[in-house]
Amino acid sequence: MLTLTGPTSTALPLPALPAAVLPWAMTHDQAAWDLRTEFDSFEGGRFVAGLARVRELATLLEALGSSLEPSLARAAALEPEADAAALDACFRSLGFGLEASTLLSDLSVYTNCVSSIDGTDAEARQFRGILASLSARLEKSRAALDLLLALASEAFTAAVLEGPEGRPHAFLVGQGRKYRDRLLPLAVENTVTTLSTDGFQAWGTLYDSITGTATCLLRPPPLAGTEGSLPAGERRIGLAEAASLWRDPDPALRQAGYEAQAQTFSLHRESLAAILNSLAGWRLAEYELRSATAPLHFLDPALAQNRMARRTFDAMMAVVDESRELGREALRLQARLMGVPRLACWDILAPCPVAGGKAGAEARNAEYSFAEGLELVRGAYAAIDPAMGDFVLEMRDTRRIEARVLSTKRPGAYCTRFAGSRRAYVFQTYRGSLADVSTLAHELGHAYHGTLLAGLPLPETHYPMTLAETASTFAETALGDYLENQAADPATRLSLAWSDAQDAATFLVNIPARLAFEQRLYGLRAEKPLGAEALGELMRSTWEEYYGDSLRNYDEHFWMSKLHFYKTGVSFYNFPYTFGYLFSLGVYARRQALGAGFHAAYAALLRDTGRMEVEDLAQRHLGVDLSRPDFWRGSVEILRAKVGRFAHLVATAGLTS
């Protein structure tokens, strides 16, 4: 079936802490998550029983689905009283289906967490395959119900949604009916679902397997080992650790991490090109099938998943494109502070070269331990509302944060939650930079969002990615303001303004470049597959167009290293980040005006994110029309003021070239 709602984030047992932990790393208890509250292990009773129950429910749902198939032929004529048997089958299907999807989600989250910690875990890989097959089986069993609720008469659908089993599904059913012209006949929907498991989904699994098991040969510069970050000499590290070096204060180590990562990705470039072409090709073929009633553009499913109208997307991206030079200017200011003519591509995530009054490699002494970083996030959250600060302590005390540096960890950071317990868990590789503290605030923002939704029916908690990024980027903004208010010296203020400049470059240049690359890829892939060399050139030319002269070189390997291009659950996993950032700035700007009532208004907005389209949410809670450029320009002006403050601090720092 065509997924019209954003997927539940999926993110497991606790491996022993490796002997060679870096000296500044946190202790086992401080930053290793403990998932035993959810599942003991793959062999444990809860996991085994959960898997058995999902299989049992799948059999029940398959029988119910078969009983609904005859009603499809006359869906538009169904009446609640005359078709009471079909109505009852819908109620039972919704009840059993919610139980099955909750259990399957929990099993999948646990499995994904295990493989995130250790990409070489063979048992986790095996269960990923088993659960993917079960997911396809459940999706196929629900196909008749989904089609029936999308195509049935208004009276019959209303009767379904008036029942206790159907009421929580009202918004999602409404979304399905809105896009019902994109649905295929039941037999074709089932064929697509069946083939997807070992076709479309398998390509994404292959990318995860490659990036989770591949290692890099790090060749640090001669003096790097004496400066406290890495041991001297060559050594093999995981891709996640190599990526984390992009945030190292030492430019030579940043370059070494980039080159190690690029070399490894280059070894797999043909495989990765095949994966990317196959994912795009599959989607385009499916969209062609779904274009019988009206042409389905490759952006349309992404917009539907994000519950966002095309006019809103166009308005936002027009403002972003006209503001691109602001992001470039931020990069030029960063280069001035670094004392170089232009940044290299491996410098775009670098920490401020002046931190705690120190520069260069000495800035490592200003790094934050995990406990210190967590306390900063707690303080920033508590400044919004005491309950938010208490939430950070709860996440710490219940060990729901995984932040260790491990060679086997998957790259990236995320927040996931278990549907059954409603508990959220955060994953990242924490090295102690201000950027890592910001990432921690970001992911805990997702977790807090989930906590606010915990009292709602589960179907009303599945928010789209656009709104998912609201709470996370809001949290980063709150952290920045908190740190600025605490800052007692110019160097600290400069470091915070540096982070604002990075945001400008990320959301106005980097993410729009990702969107442009992916749009062009899909346009070209409709004609023919692109080889690794062509993909590299497309990436390089896109970076050149968007970054212009603000960088001295371009990352032509980015198409291989960016996980977002290989997501199977969500397409165009890029523009929602810019949406979330600019939207959250608009939300945060109302903090002063609302005063003591702000947190209640903010929480109310977040609680509605799983049951409203973005335009309706903004109109109800902010009184703004997102399809007009005014709102987006207002958010960019907030960002422009931040970059202006950074420019002033750079000019007065006395450290420019």
Image: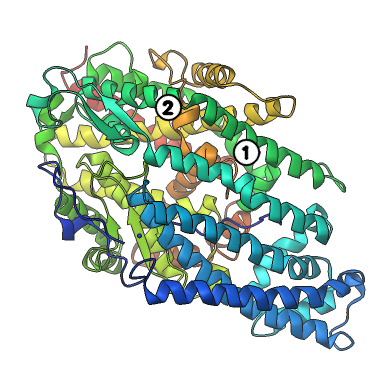
Q: Kindly identify which residue carries mark 1.
A: 279
Where in the figure is residue 637, as x and y percent of width and height?
45, 36
Q: Could you tell me which residue is drawn at 64 percent across and 66 percent down? A: 138
Q: Which mark is residue 179?
A: none
Where in the figure is residue 205, as x and y percent of width and height?
52, 45
Q: Could you tell me which residue is drawn at 44 percent across and 22 percent down? A: 266
Q: Kindly identify which residue carries mark 2.
A: 265
Q: Could you tell me which residue is drawn at 70 percent across and 44 percent down? A: 300
Disc 2 + disc 1, Cβ < 8 Å: no
Quarter the N terminus occupies: bottom right
In this rendering, the answer to whether 374 lies above or below 295 is below
Given the image, on which type of amino acid does mark 1 rest?
A: Leu
Distance of label 2 from label 1 (alpha carbons): 18 Å
Where in the figure is residue 41, as x and y percent of width and height?
35, 67
SS category of the residue bearing label 1: helix
Given the image, on which type of amino acid does mark 2 rest?
A: Phe
In this rendering, the answer to whether 633 lies above or below 391 is above
In this rendering, the answer to whether 244 lies above or below 111 is above
Foreground pick, 239 / 198: 198
- On the image, which quarter does residue 425 sit in? bottom left
Mark 2, Cα crowd under 10 Å, few <14 / some 14-19 / many 20+, is many
